[in-house]
Amino acid sequence: MSSQIINRKYLVTGASGYVGGRLVKALLDDHHQVRVFLRDKSKIQGQPWAQSVEVVEGNANNLSDLAKALDGIHTAYYLLHSINLGPDFDTIEATMARNFAKTAHEQGVEQIVYLGGIANDKKTSKHLASRARAGTELASQQVPVMELRAGIVIGSGSASFEMLRHLTHRLPIMTTPKWVTNKTQPIAIRDVLWYLRKSAALTTPVNKVFDIGGPEVLTYADMMQQFAKISGLPKRWIIKVPVLTPKLSSLWIGLVTPVPTALARPLVGSLISEVVADPAKSVNALIPPPPEGLLNVEGAIRLALGQISKHSVETRWSDAGITTAPWQKAQSDPDWAGEVILKDHREILSQLPSSLIWKKIEGIGGEHGWYGADWLWWLRGLLDRAFGGVGLRRGRRDPDQLRVGESLDFWRVEALENEKLLRLYAEMILPGKAWLEFRLDKVDGQTRIIQEARFAPRGLGGQLYWYAVLPFHAFIFPTMLRNIIKRASQENELQK
């Protein structure tokens, strides 16, 4: 690597997201200097690379924050999206991209790399049209923009892969909309990262749009059949019906997969037209494919499933968080801020080692469940989905270990101290803000487990909600605490 490239500094926006989190690791593996720009630095606290990057915390809509993030940067990776910010997300994305490009020019940035979406069809969705418009706005200023456009990204933890996986697993017979026969050109996340990381080593700035895709063009129905075959499932029966609009399709996907309707809608919208890379826009003359070649669909699926089975999922689609109700946005407001905090506090002493108890606490949710009354948790998740929330099916990235900032069913890990503290922030739809916290400490040689549910109600409706669910708390939380001790005790006996 030349000294010119070694001295460069790279900015990654969206570092708490699915692609951004993996790109940071890839750039660090290539020995690059990396700065990340994000709204909340706690979102990356659990990442193994968190101490190896420079962090700038701020808002992409704030020009002074942008200037601070872009100061001294050679190449800026633009991985920002606003698809969950309401019906005007396309206008928000365009303004954000334009401000980013303008500030980049003012700060002397030499290259912007933007990951967009393939949009070669005139009937493209609003989501893909917005991605294309963001690329245009980035290129409207004087900094050269290298735009890499991809279609469906297949990788462990990607929203597209989770949608494919759960539709195929759960529905042996499917009535599907006609878009399942549209042509698409998926690409493995491994290969997306290859092109992104190699763009960091280009000797001169590039100002051009490129399409990147895997080696196969096939239909979404073909992908489902391939997934079924690889997973050892019988051939899926796919019956096309004309009445399933993209809106109805996204509602259905939100019902049967972990991907919530709000995220499924743009994903489905991206499939209503053919998403195939244009050979005239190939990047391979500038950045050759990996030496081992691009992964085909079967290879990409096998790699993703392998990472899941090994519990080696680096990032997930849910890592970046969701857009919640306005009163839920501010987390961890202190008691002295004037906010009413309602609490359900319980504690118990145990002779068991704190390490065993902590193991059960850290393993809560996902495939391990919630230690009793799981049907009530399932019902609450179903209710949340019915009102447009994320529900329980997001699960966990890893069944046993957690990281700060990642999702856990309809919670998010807000604080984590090994064998001391786990605090979860509720991302379910609520008339207020809620936390569930576990703390461990030592009292007279015993392990004390403190379990506390806290709720900051929004108005009278929030307070009525709290008192309405108190009878359920009286059953759920003591049961949870007892079963944590019981599971830890069972493991202790097995270890003897």
Image (cartoon, helix red, strand yellow):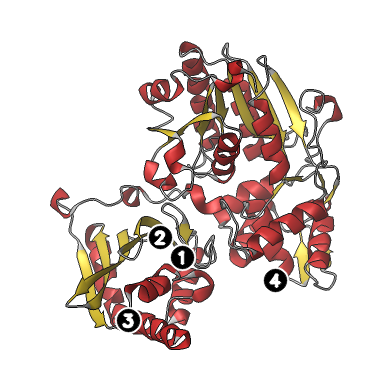
User: How far is disc 2 from disc 3 in space, using C-alphas?
Assistant: 36 Å
Q: Which element carries disc 2, helix, strand or loop?
A: loop
Label 2 crowd bin: few (<14), some (14–19), many (20+), radius 10 Å: many
The three-letter amino acid code for the residue at tag 3 is Leu
Q: Nearer the viewer, mark 2 or mark 4?
A: 4
Residue 246 x, y percent position in the rendering = 68, 52
Q: Is residue 241 left or right of residue 149?
A: right
Q: Nearer the viewer, mark 2 or mark 3?
A: 3
| Residue found at x 42% / y 57% | 412
Q: Which element carries disc 3, helix, strand or loop?
A: loop
The residue that label 2 is drawn on is: 429
Q: Is residue 289 above or below residue 262?
A: above
User: How far is disc 2 from disc 4 in space, using C-alphas?
Assistant: 26 Å
| Residue found at x 13% / y 51% | 336
Q: Pointers 1 and 3 in contact (CB under 8 A)?
A: no
| Residue found at x 59% / y 56% | 313
Q: In the orientation shown, which residue stands out farthest toward the front?
A: 496
Q: Which element carries disc 1, helix, strand or loop?
A: helix
User: How far is disc 1 from disc 2 in space, using C-alphas?
Assistant: 6 Å
Q: Pointers 4 and 1 in contact (CB under 8 A)?
A: no
Q: 280 or 295, which lies in front?
A: 295
User: How far is disc 3 from disc 4 in space, using C-alphas?
Assistant: 40 Å
Q: Is residue 395 left or right of residue 202?
A: left
Q: Pointers 3 and 4 in contact (CB under 8 A)?
A: no
The residue that label 4 is drawn on is: 170
User: How far is disc 4 from disc 1 in space, using C-alphas?
Assistant: 20 Å
The three-letter amino acid code for the residue at tag 2 is Ile
The residue that label 1 is drawn on is: 384
Q: Earlier in the sequence, mark 2 or mark 4?
A: 4
The quarter of the rendered structure image containing the N terminus is top right
